[in-house]
Image (cartoon, rainbow, N blue to C red):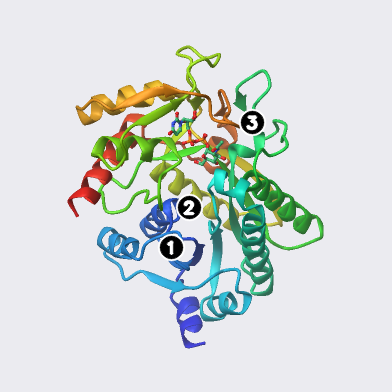
Amino acid sequence: MISRIFEIMNDVKHILVTGGAGYIGSHTVVELYENGYIPVIVDDFRNSHLSVINGLEKITGQKIIYRKLDVCDYKAFEKVFIEFSFVGAIHFAAYKAVGESVQSPLKYYKNNLLALINCLELAEKYHVENIVFSSSCTVYGEPTGVKTVTEESKIQPASSPYGNSKQIGEEIIDDLIKSGSSLKILKLRYFNPVGAHETGLIGELPIGKPTNLLPFVTQTAIGKLDELTVFGNDYNTPDGTCIRDYIHVCDLALAHVKSIEWLENQPNSLSDSINIGTGKGTSVLEIIHTFEKVSESSLNWKFGDRRDGDIEEIYANVDKSWKLLKWKPTKTVKDAIFDAWNWELKLNND
Ligand code: UD1
């Protein structure tokens, strides 16, 4: 109670960050601090490392507030809402491995949906009105015709339980708002987050063998993995490999802060979706060649078969994010590759 009175009197803006020790969550914590908010991390560290907290403390020079708990445990999660008076919540906590979700669909639905429902229920109960939900461009599936998707592009049947958990999550949010809830929710549809913080103190820490491209590249280059396989070279793209919209994780992190700022200024309840990307496409071979230039090394890679469910080419139409959030990415794919490599080198030295 005393801490809540202190918050109100001192205009402290606490933001709940579920999954705040994870890859995107941790970079968002840094941006929140830099923009005058005090993030409160809730994470059970099942897919992240406690060392992230040390990295965050070194970057921000602040004592990081975190509570180790599972957001699927309603009672434990509620204690955080009682302890702090949040002006907003950013909900990252979710499983995200596509392949694993196909093997264990119930694990994915149970965790990802229960976590979201608990977060929304508690946000309503404790009047935390400004909510950002981590969604994904995976909701668009393979675009038909134009490869640039807008928020109005067709949502297609998900190709994995992971993707479906994001689609259902979006639907749960829409239904809640239709029911008359007072919450204001932005669903951020991320394209491909890459890179690390420029200090090399936080970055992507995949548990086990990475499935995403850039950590696979850096781990191969450092010698943790033997060889990178490029999945398919017969796609209908200029160099035959798939094209994605890679966005620097720090740019993506700032988009969350801009979303909270925007939501704070909205008078009425709402649910809206926003693409968070750069609007530019990069092929797998372009990533490899840029990496080789940046790292001044040659990568051990070969062409292999296509990966099931892979999308040929997709990138974001970013008009809405630029217009609504007044936010534009400032970093290039080359910057992201440089930072990811710096992070991998630091991890190796430590
Ligand atoms: C994947 C997920 C997507 C999720 C996103 C999160 C799939 C089908 N999709 O997207 O749902 O939201 O990660 O970041 O898994 N590649 C290789 N060799 C590798 C790894 C990747 O060639 O070892 C290629 C892929 O074929 C793809 C590109 O690199 O063309 C990017 O792959 P990845 O990083 O896995 O991202 P997405 O497939 O876009």
Q: Amino acid at mark 3?
A: Thr
Labelled disc at residue 37: 1
Q: Residue at x 39, y 71 (%)?
A: 65
Q: Nearer the viewer, mark 3 or mark 1?
A: 3
Q: Give the spatial CA distance, label 2 vs label 3.
A: 22 Å
Q: Amino acid at mark 1?
A: Tyr
Helix, strand or loop for disc 3: loop
Total tally of numbered discs in the picture? 3
2 or 3: tag closer to the N-terminus: 3
- Describe residue 228's horizontal placement relative to residue 245 as left or right: left
- Describe residue 109's horizontal placement relative to residue 15 as left or right: right
Coordinates of residue 312 in the picture (x, y in percent): 56, 23
- Identify the residue at the far bottom of this view: 2
Helix, strand or loop for disc 2: helix
Q: Are marks 2 and 1 in contact (CB under 8 Å)?
A: yes
Coordinates of residue 328 in the picture (x, y in percent): 46, 36
Q: Give the spatial CA distance, label 2 vs label 1.
A: 9 Å
Q: Residue at x 59, y 77 (%)?
A: 78
2 or 1: tag closer to the N-terminus: 1
Tell which of 238 and 10 is nearer to you: 238
Q: Residues within 10 Å of mark 2 (few under 14, many from 20)?
A: many
Q: Nearer the viewer, mark 2 or mark 3?
A: 3
Labelled disc at residue 150: 3
Tell which of 260 and 193 is nearer to you: 193
Labelled disc at residue 257: 2
Q: Residues within 10 Å of mark 3 (few under 14, many from 20)?
A: some
Labelled disc at residue 310: none
Coordinates of residue 26 in the picture (x, y in percent): 40, 56
